[in-house]
Amino acid sequence: MIKIRNVNLVDGSIVNVEIDQGLVKAISKSTGKDNLDGIDGAGKILMPGLVDLHTHLREPGREDSETVLTGSESAVAGGFTAISAMANTNPVADTAGVVEQIYRLGKNAGICDVNPIGAVTKGLKGEQLSEIGAMAESIANVRIFSDDGNCVADPLIMRRALEYVKTYNGIIAQHAQEPRLTVNAQMNEGVISAKIGLAGWPAVAEEAIIARDILLTDHVQSRLHICHVTTAGGVELVRWAKQRGIQVTAEVTPHHLLLTDDLVENYDPIYKVNPPLRTEKDVMALRQGLAEGVIDIVATDHAPHSAEHKDCEWQSAAFGMVGLETALSVVIKTMIETKLMTWAELSDRMSIRPAQIAGYKNQGQKIVEGSAANLVLVDPNSHWTVDRHNLKSKSKNTPFDKMELPGVISEIIYNGNLVVQNGKQTSLGLGHND
């Protein structure tokens, strides 16, 4: 049994919590000074474990950058009890065999849920639909399908995919990037790209696909999820769709809530990311969209790359940033400290809502008696300084190195087991099953 005393819930109540056999067994009101045994939660906030719908784990094929195990360790260090493995592995996760392999690797790691995402098209080539039905009916129970890293650019293929996933109550997660408008693009198209001479990626390349796919989704009455929205125009398109009752959800990454394209001026490839960092106006629109719930969730787009693919000249560097371990802190900085959101709203955007979108039944549950014990305990008043060398991820390509961030995670409880205690992974949190 695990006991947590004098802890704050996101609604402001102070309680004592007992956890047993994978469930929240009892919740009792606390005076704030209860002298009980167990974990001292005074001054800390207990939330449902975070849920990420956009994680690149690289295995199989690029184990030099990340594995399911190291990605899981990075996830729990960041407060996540469920992550979703994108399909752009090698071989691509476009068959039941590959998604089942990833699912089993997650089970073997045993420290958070690892839910494979299936490719929409074979080989991510955008030409033929993948084995959507077989992946949905596999032991991995795939419900999210995405060619992330590539856009499903052909409107007929996209329509067929949206129609097909309806059979399984599935969802298509689209990487919105019109390829003909982004040939050789390196960064946001704007004042900075013109100044430093890098090929620009216009906002309309993202917005054109968002608009098209909203209309297709409405036409076939299916479900669409927009990955990593980055532009003010994209937020408005999603708002328009929701006002009309179209089944569209959207995500924003932590780095797009904080960083802007002026950081690219020194050609540091740590800031090279797909989609690119945008302008201050876009950042403010994204924050407002997330606060209002127009953007449903925060997703990390955790994109690990080895040093040889990131610590090099800009043109040769890979797109992407790691994000699992800094996500919560960046959202606290951009949304809580700015008073744009409450802790209850943060928990909704980073846990409850992503679990609902994906259908992860034992994740993102409000903390009540009988709920699944997948929980994170965070000290909102403490700060930490990011050190890339101390990250649990196998790759170290964080844009937040040496930055002081708010919010220190002290405990993670996964399926009723302590996998992180006092900020350190337990023996259970070192890749071993209970």
Image (spheres, rainbow, N blue to C red):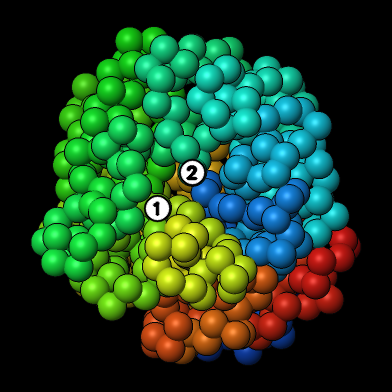
> Residue 371 in the image: x percent, y percent?
63, 50
Q: Residues under labels 2 and 1: Cα distance?
A: 8 Å
* Residue for badge 1: 274
> Residue 319 in the image: x percent, y percent?
45, 58
Location of residue 282 (image quadrant): bottom left
> Residue 379 in the image: x percent, y percent?
48, 81
| Residue at horizontal 33 percent and vertical 10 percent from the top | 219
Label 2: state its secondary structure: loop
312 is higher (above) or lower (below) than 105: below
Q: Residues within 10 Å of mark 1 (few under 14, many from 20)?
A: many
Which mark, residue 149? 2
Left of 257 or right of it: where is 57? right
Name which residue type carries label 1.
Asn
Q: Residues within 10 Å of mark 2 (few under 14, many from 20)?
A: some
| Residue at horizontal 69 percent and vertical 49 percent from the top | 114
| Residue at horizontal 50 percent and vertical 40 percent from the top | 148
Which mark, residue 341? none
Name which residue type carries label 2.
Gly
33 is higher (above) or lower (below) than 161: below
